[in-house]
Amino acid sequence: MRRLHAGNGSAKELNEACLRLFDQALDEVGIEGATRVRMSTYFREAAASFDAHADSKDLVPEDVPSNYAR
């Protein structure tokens, strides 16, 4: 997944729209409180981590995990 998005530059406006839609989806399905905060924070951190590879596919290590883990 990271290689698919890597090398395309940073897409700040697209990222912000995606984050807004994710939060809207959480609202629509009724996820609230601490669970909502954790899910939103996780998604935001995972999305932000893609910018580390925005400039080149070569920046993505071969052994990068397929899921986001802190």
Image (cartoon, rainbow, N blue to C red):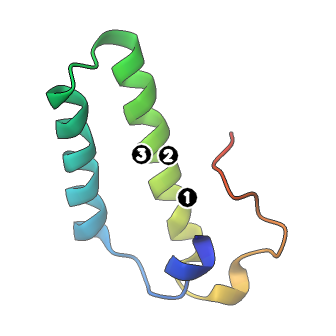
Identify which amino acid the numbered label 2 is placed on. Glu
Q: Position of residue 56 (x, y in %)?
A: 60, 88
The residue lying furthest to the right in this view is: 63
| Quadrant assignment, res 36 | top left
Precedes in sequence: disc 3 or disc 1: 3
Q: For the residues marked 2 and 1, what is the alpha-carbon distance in whole angstroms?
A: 6 Å
Mark 1 packing: few (<14 Cα in 10 Å), some, or many (20+)?
Answer: few
Q: Is residue 38 above or below residue 33?
A: below
Q: Secondary structure at mark 3?
A: helix
- Under circle 1, the secondary element is helix
Disc 3 crowd rating (10 Å Cα; few below 14, some 14-19, many 20+) is: some
* Amino acid type, callout 1: Ser
Label drawn at residue 45: 2
Q: Quadrant of residue 13?
A: bottom left
> Which quadrant does the N terminus fall into?
bottom right
Please give the residue where the numbered disc 1 appears in the rendered image: 49
* Labelled pair 2, 1 in contact (Cβ < 8 Å): yes
Residue 5 locus on image (x, y percent): 50, 78
Which amino acid, mark 3? Arg
- CA neighbours of label 2 inside 10 A, class few (<14), some (14 to 19), many (20+): some
**Marks 3 and 1 in Cβ contact (< 8 Å):** no
The x, y position of residue 68, in whole percent, is 63, 48
Is 63 rendered above or below residue 26?
A: below
